[in-house]
Amino acid sequence: MTQSAVPNRLSGNWRHYLLRWETFLLLVAALVFLFNSFASPYFLDPWNLSDATFNFTEKAIIALPMAMLIICREIDLSVASIIALASVSMGLAAEAGMGTGSLVAIAIAVGVACGLFNGLVVTGFGIPSIVVTIGTMSLYRGITYVILGDGAFTDYPSEFAYFGQGYVYWVFSFEFVLFLGLALVFYVLLHHTNFGRRTYAIGNNPTAALYSGIKVNKHKLILFVLVGALSGLASVLLTSRLGSTRPSIAFAWELNIVTMVVLGGVSILGGAGSILGVVIAVFLMGLVTFGLGLLNVPGIVMSIIIGAMLISVISIPVLLGRWRAMRERQS
């Protein structure tokens, strides 16, 4: 190798990292952080920043397996309703006198059951997951309204509050530390295991993956169960933080979760994306919503901004692809 080849390789690597979507997200997040620092004198307070993590941690935990599911060309829009059903199940168990450990186990079990049902219908009958999970979104939420009506469950054990309100150290909440730990687990799972490689293979070409020996339906079923399980876990955190269960709990969260995933660079068409990008997108959305909250921006305006972010992120790659194709034809 010549001496000139080494600088060329180094410059190529730097160019590769600079042009990554994750780098762009980091830059935007830094600009948002800087803007918020000047816009509100309360933004840089450590406890305020800690409180801000409560607004996105539960959603972010679900975004991790959702990213893998979307990479695999599937989606689950019933996650918010799974949270509600798991929360109602915990409320019923708490009224029956069950302890904290049993409540956590019940919530995760309900999440697993819902995810398994979604996955079995999708893989067993070949129905598109977006259709199936829109149906189960209404089904699971409807069950919660049948059980609770306009009522609420509030009689939870005192130690149950730690999951959604406790701190591990200083300003670092249990929820936030749990999210960071799960992010590391899913990073390794997607990027450094055969399971992750199979996920990308299915997302890029399901037919080729099937003929190469990958059990495509089984793989997808596992991912649906993972999404359901972490939805159940998120239900534990959210119910603990609120201290109560209502049938409208986590209403419309699926939009925020999908936005986190797609904003993180996961292709809605499957086959591409990274956990690192999703984690950065989570913090970016957290900074945006927290900063707008400090400026007393109404919730409906935040919803408009999140919707605009989702449309923009989906549209930008399509427009760039058309622009490149047009330039190639002209040349």
Image: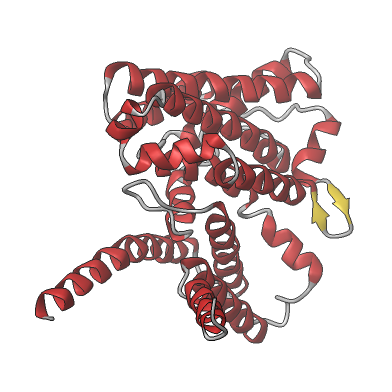
Q: Residue at x 30, y 34 (%)?
A: 208
Q: Image quadrant for the N terminus?
A: bottom right
| Residue most extreme to the front | 1
Q: x, y percentage for residue 288?
A: 55, 69
Q: Is residue 246 visible?
A: no
Where in the figure is residue 51, as x and y percent of width and height?
73, 59
Residue placed most toward the observer, 144 or 219:
219
In front here: 279 or 15? Answer: 15
Q: What colouring does the structure picture have?
A: secondary structure
Q: Is residue 18 shown to the viewer in this render?
A: yes
The answer to whether residue 256 is above or below residue 185 is below
Q: Which is more toward the observer, 220 or 131? A: 220
Looking at the image, which residue sits at the far left? 330
Find residue 117 and report its image quarter. Answer: top left
Vertical arrangement, residue 124 with respect to residue 151, above or below: above
Residue under the image location 76 percent in, 49 percent down: 177
Residue at position x 49%, y 73% from top?
24
